């Protein structure tokens, strides 16, 4: 179990180091990857365990599984980054729409306030003129509405 955890941990460390290093395998995190200087010394008979207790076939399977996991992780990271970018675009569009709607609301509010202020000033001027004797500017009485039969 510990060896498996160390292998997975090592695989992630190798992936972080780069693609060339990621393809190398390391079965024990405490052991550095040895680069053989003598080819005859590094050749092991088929299916005979190496000093760490693994066979070349096990190492090849481990390398294959690590490469498959690395490819899946890379694909998942790309998909996640695309999702993050899509959410960021949607958020920016929503913020822009909100800003546009808010600006339109504020403009309408200012227009109505200006119109209201203008009408109030005209009404106040009419009231002042009416009180001063200009009856043409006084409000006209409203005829009562006849009751319904």
Image (cartoon, rainbow, N blue to C red):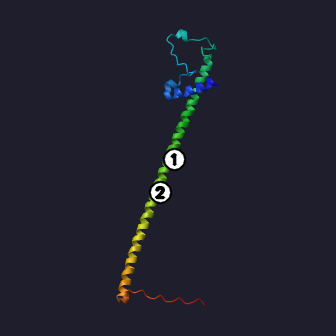
Residue 87 tag number: 1
| Residue 82 seen in the figure | yes
> Residue 68: percent from the left, percent from the top?
58, 29
Identify the secondary structure beneath mark 2.
helix
Residue found 49% across the figure and 50% down from its top: 91
> Residue 4: percent from the left, percent from the top?
62, 25
Identify the secondary structure beneath mark 1.
helix
Residue found 37% across the figure and 79% down from its top: 122
**Disc 2 crowd, CA 10 A, few/some/many (<14, 14-19, 20+):** few
Q: Quadrant of residue 102?
A: bottom left
When the figure is inspected, residue 86 is found, relative to residue 133, above or below; the finding is above
Most foreground residue, 132 or 7 = 132
Between disc 2 and disc 1, whose residue precedes? 1
When the figure is inspected, residue 75 is found, relative to residue 131, above or below; the finding is above
Alpha-carbon distance for marks 2 and 1?
16 Å
Query: Circle 2 sits on which residue?
Result: 98
| Residue 18 seen in the figure | no
> Residue 35: percent from the left, percent from the top?
50, 16
- Which quarter shows the N terminus? top right
Q: Is 14 left, or right, of 106 in this rendering?
A: right
> Residue 23: percent from the left, percent from the top?
53, 24
Q: Quadrant of residue 135?
A: bottom left
């Amino acid at each position: 179990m510990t060896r498996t955890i160390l292998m997975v941990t090592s695989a992630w460390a190798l992936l972080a180091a780069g693609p060339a290093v990621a393809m190398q395998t390391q079965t024990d995190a405490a052991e550095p990857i040895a680069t053989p200087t003598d080819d005859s010394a590094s050749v092991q008979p088929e299916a005979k365990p190496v000093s760490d207790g693994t066979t070349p076939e096990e190492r090849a399977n481990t390398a294959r599984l690590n490469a498959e996991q690395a490819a899946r992780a890379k694909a998942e990271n790309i998909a996640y980054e695309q999702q993050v970018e899509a959410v960021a675009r949607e958020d920016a569009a929503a913020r822009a729409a909100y800003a546009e709607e808010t600006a339109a609301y504020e403009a309408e509010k200012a227009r109505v306030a200006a119109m209201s202020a203008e009408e109030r000033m005209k009404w106040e001027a009419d009231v002042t003129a009416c009180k001063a004797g200009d009856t043409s500017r006084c409000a006209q009485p409203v005829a009562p509405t006849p009751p319904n039969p």
